[in-house]
Amino acid sequence: MRKYLLVIFVGVNLLLGGVNGRFYKDAEREIATNGMSAVGDPGMRRNGLRVAFEAWNFCNEVAHEAPGMGSPRAADCFDVSNSTLLHKVSEADNKLGIGKTFKGLSTEAMHRPDLYAVEKELYLGSLCEVSDSSKPWQFWMVMLKNGNFDTKAGFCPENGKPKPPFTTSKNFPCFGEGCMNQPTLNHQPTQLLGDGTMRGWFNGTYDLDADIGKGLTNLSFYEVIWEKTLGSGSWVFKHRLKTSMKYPWLMLYLRADATKGFSGGYHYETRGMLHTLPRSNFKVKFSLEIKKGGGPKSQFYLIDIGSCWKNNGEPCDGDVLTDVTRYSEMIINPDVPAWCSPTALVNCPPYHITPNNAKILRNDTANFPYGAYHYYCAPGNAQHLEQPVSLCDPYSNPQAQEILQLLPHPIWGEYGYPTEKGQGWIGDPRTWVLDTGGLASRLYFYQDPNTPLAKRRWTSIDMGTEIFVTDKDEEAEWILSDLDVILL
């Protein structure tokens, strides 16, 4: 393990040019000799980019398309031949919306925005798919989500069950009717510039009547710019996310999702970059520079892994009443505190498992690492929960969910994760090599008693931030490159 820690803590910064070449080459050799990649574009180094865009409302649906924008799905996919970019997706494809047909569209989805978006993603995936091996793959996914929730609109189920309009004392953000709208989407198809740089972008706002060209004061805003030097280096993804008083809870991630089946948080076929689903023996490598943090309520995820299995351990099958989305998220914003504590066991998982597989119960106040956990919440459809327990929000996924949020702590050092607050934060760009599989196999997730252990297959791996219900405009900015998932 010492050799992995050496690679992790050298503070390599590919993005700023402050690269310690010897250590970086050591890291590359380490990966090359120990495993194979689970993604179609290892390290983001393929000249021909594959990237897509998806936007969701609070419960991972669409409900209504933004006027003139089409369904909130888009892609920028191309190959390179003789210094020419050969695009696979037209802007007419990206503007497709309800009522407009495309190959494979079902009659049922033609005028239903939620279903249309799902089938449009599959269509864009068919245009972008790379089939140069026995395991085809489609694209990296930019995911944007609006946390506004209009409980009177009746759009979102409750733990998978249909939920009619209701009122509640819980403080869900919503400025009134229409607060769950989809954003505008502007797209610059990737171009090859005179200096050999390839560059393109997606951006937009949730404020549908705004002109972002006149400034972002009091406006929401998102942007992802990708660029790469033709023939060398990695694609560099530059992200910006800005909240406003009308849209105080926004999420923006870059995801590697399953190429088929269900990705984390969804109950339908998706497309993505993970042609092989990692389980317990894998590492995740990437370079990350955080330039702006997004304020004290920005739950910036160094890494977020997602999957789905039922409470009895069986794999998910699309039945939203019994499927459960499972997430584990490492938050590196040093302003985010540990809600888990000896006096708040309700926010802690029932137990912690050490790297040598010892189990520490949460009421063992002398040994349980309370500071390593921000928050744990259990699935709302679980029948045998250990008390005390906090139930996860039942509305923000199409089915019940379980969330385990981690914080930097010495206990995670064995896996290459940050051990102290501030590591990897603003002013500390790093290349990370995380033993995500080793950690994920030891994390607590609920399961019904006396049932076969679930086979944990991670269908989504992403980085980015969830700026959580701010009371003023906040902005996050970060740069991601070199992402790879290595099977050992």
Image (cartoon, helix red, strand yellow):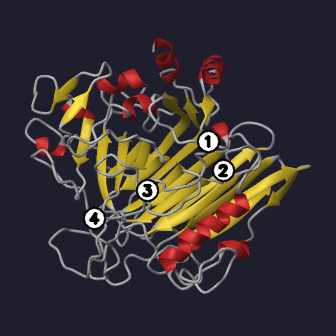
Residue labelled with disc 3: 475
Q: Position of residue 324 (x, y in %)?
A: 33, 55
Q: Quadrant of the C terminus?
A: top right
Pick whichever of labels 3 and 4 is earlier in the sequence.
4
Residue labelled with disc 2: 137
Label 3 vs label 4, nearer the camera: 4
Q: Secondary structure at mark 3?
A: strand
Tag 1: residue type?
Val
Pick whichever of labels 2 and 1 is earlier in the sequence.
1
Residue labelled with disc 4: 159
> What is the spatial separation of the Cα atoms under label 4 and label 2, in whole angstroms?
31 Å
Q: Is residue 468 above or below residue 485?
A: below
Q: Which of 51 and 134 lies nearest the eye of the viewer?
A: 134
Tag 2: residue type?
Trp
> What is the spatial separation of the Cα atoms under label 3 and label 2, in whole angstroms?
33 Å
Tag 4: residue type?
Asn
Pick whichever of labels 4 and 2 is earlier in the sequence.
2
Q: Secondary structure at mark 1?
A: loop
Q: Position of residue 461 (x, y in %)?
A: 49, 45
Q: Position of residue 229 (x, y in %)?
A: 76, 43
Q: Secondary structure at mark 2?
A: loop
On the rendered structure, is 258 left or right of 167?
A: right
